[in-house]
Image: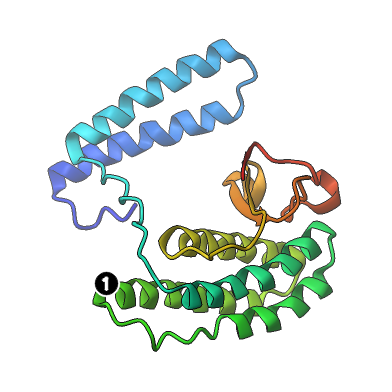
């Protein structure tokens, strides 16, 4: 955390709290007994509450609201789902080259004609999501190995989820939303697939069936 804007008194409080938080994290990594983990968790919770009392914690942003668009616009967005699937399957099969090849179709699908969007709220929402999508596509093109591509695929999955929530894709058939808590260095990541049987794109054959949350 950049604390350079804090006053001297506030900085002293922050330095104290941040040192305690880091110490508990370091200690927690080496624990192998649940009783000790509970003790550290209790102390950590106490200091996070102190952090909230002294500085305040920013609330989670509200969930994006659904915006009604034409079936024609949804059909265009559904093209992203069609282009997404081969990449998901290739990564689940540990096939970096095939996943990379799928990026061309994904970029073509991202060229959505938004000329029919007239409502200001709709256009603002699409402009935001389109910018996010373009950024993800650029980063996916720069991925030089399968691990890098998997990391950017997680971003793509998040963006696809946002498009589904905000605009919808129309009737695209079965779509499963899955989550792997171990993906991306333990940060966790979601993905979408059309088959019921889990095919984890973040671990491939190493842990193909790893998923802790599945939604249809």
Q: From what the image shows, is residue 136 above or below residue 46?
A: below
Residue pictured at 49% horizontal, 15% vertical? 38
Residue pictured at 18% horizontal, 35% vertical? 54
User: Which residue is nearer to you in this view: 189 or 143?
Assistant: 189
Left or right of residue 31: residue 7: left
Picture quadrant of residue 45: top left
Left or right of residue 68: residue 165: right
Location of residue 6 in the rendering, given as x and y in whole percent from the top left corner: 18, 51
User: Which residue is nearer to you in this view: 39 or 150?
Assistant: 150
- In this picture the colour scheme is rainbow
Disc 1: CA contacts within 10 A as few (<14), some (14-19) or many (>=20) = few
Location of residue 181 in the rendering, given as x and y in whole percent from the top left corner: 62, 41
Quadrant for the C terminus, please. Answer: top right
Left or right of residue 72: residue 216: right
Location of residue 88 in the rendering, given as x and y in whole percent from the top left corner: 73, 62
Picture quadrant of residue 127: bottom left
Let me know if residue 135 appears in the view.
no
Let me know if residue 112 appears in the view.
yes
Residue pictured at 66% horizontal, 48% vertical? 183
Residue pictured at 85% horizontal, 59% vertical? 93
Please, what secondary structure does the residue beneath circle 1 have?
helix
Q: Residue furthest top?
A: 35
Label 1: which residue?
A: 121
Location of residue 205 in the rendering, given as x and y in whole percent from the top left corner: 86, 50
Give the tally of numbered discs.
Answer: 1
Q: From what the image shows, is residue 165 above or below residue 70?
A: above
Picture quadrant of residue 34: top right
Q: From what the image shows, is residue 202 above or below residue 215?
A: below
């Amino acid at each position: 955390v950049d604390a350079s804007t804090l006053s001297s008194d506030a900085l002293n409080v922050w330095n104290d709290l941040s040192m305690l938080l880091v110490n508990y994290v370091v200690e927690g990594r080496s624990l192998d007994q649940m009783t000790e983990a509970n003790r550290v968790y209790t102390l950590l919770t106490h200091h996070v509450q102190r952090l909230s009392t002294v500085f305040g914690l920013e609330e989670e942003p509200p969930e994006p609201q659904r915006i009604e668009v034409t079936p024609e616009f949804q059909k265009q967005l559904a093209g992203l789902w069609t282009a997404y699937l081969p990449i998901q399957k290739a990564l689940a099969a540990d096939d970096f080259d095939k996943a990379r090849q799928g990026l061309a179709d994904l970029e073509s699908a991202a060229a959505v004609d938004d000329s029919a969007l007239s409502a200001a709220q709709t256009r603002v929402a699409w402009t935001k999501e389109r910018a996010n999508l373009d950024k993800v596509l650029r980063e996916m093109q720069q991925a030089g190995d399968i691990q890098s591509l998997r990391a950017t695929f997680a971003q793509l999955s998040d963006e696809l989820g946002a498009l589904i929530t905000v605009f919808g894709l129309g009737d695209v058939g079965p779509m499963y939303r899955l989550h792997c808590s171990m993906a991306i260095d333990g940060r966790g990541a979601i993905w979408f697939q059309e088959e019921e049987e889990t095919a984890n794109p973040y671990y491939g054959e190493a842990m193909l069936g790893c998923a802790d949350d599945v939604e249809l």
